[in-house]
Amino acid sequence: MENQNGKTVAQNKKAYHDYFVIEEAEAGIELFGTEVKSIRQGRVNLKDSWCSIKEGEIFVNGMHISPYEHGNIFNRDPLRVRRLLMHKREINRLFGLTKQQGYAIVPLSLYFVKGRAKLKIGLCKGKKLYDKREVAAKKDAQRDIERNLSIRNS
């Protein structure tokens, strides 16, 4: 998988299923060496992760980075809370939107840019069950149209 900026390591497909992504932003992550090595091996899971803002700093919770096999005593807790690196102005803007309009901040993908791990986060609004059904129906209809066109063209 390739991102326009670099190599994509992990994606949170569940986020696109459960939320409408209103806006996207990029943030750096504060990591330790063994965590970076483990991420480079693709041993990371974003499925149940979310972001929280405390005291003007943004953190990612629930992001699972498996322990590095050769890391011994230097390995950290796989589910530890990790600080994200963003400008204070961006963090305050996101904080205001989440408090006023009921949005959530969700990690969407993890990738490397020039050797640095970056996390694409999204400002998201939750989908209702009928929204999910509507999206699934549109996908099915599009799939049927493409199938019929390919049969007709061959």
Image (cartoon, rainbow, N blue to C red):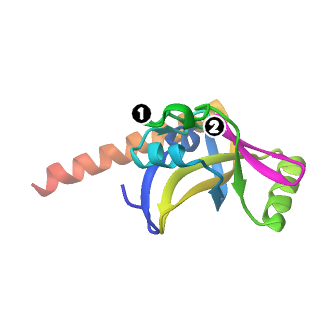
The kind of secondary structure element at disc 2 is: loop
From mark 1 to mark 2, how far is it between C-alphas?
Answer: 23 Å
Image point (44%, 68%), residue name:
4
Residue holding disc 2: 49
Name which quarter of the figure residue 140 lies in: top left
Ranked by sequence position, the earlier of labels 1 and 2 is 2
Image point (86%, 60%), residue name:
92
Is 104 or 33 nearer to us in this picture? 33
* Residue 55 spot, x, y in % from top left: 90, 49
Label 1 CA crowd tier, 10 Å (few <14, some 14–19, many 20+): few
Task: Describe residue 122's horizontal placement relative to residue 58 as left or right.
Answer: left
Task: Describe residue 121's horizontal placement relative to residue 41 as left or right.
Answer: right
Most prominent secondary structure in the magenta stretch? strand
Q: Quadrant of the N terminus?
A: bottom left
- At label 2, the amino acid type is Ser
Image point (44%, 50%), residue name:
9
* Residue 70 spot, x, y in % from top left: 42, 36
Is 19 or 63 nearer to us in this picture? 63
Check the image and name the residue furthest to the front. Answer: 73
Q: What range is drawn magenta here?
A: 50-62
Residue holding disc 1: 69
* Residue 117 spot, x, y in % from top left: 54, 57
Rendered position, 77 above or below 108:
above
Magenta segment: does it hold 60? yes
Magenta segment: does it hold 23? no
* Residue 71 spot, x, y in % from top left: 47, 37
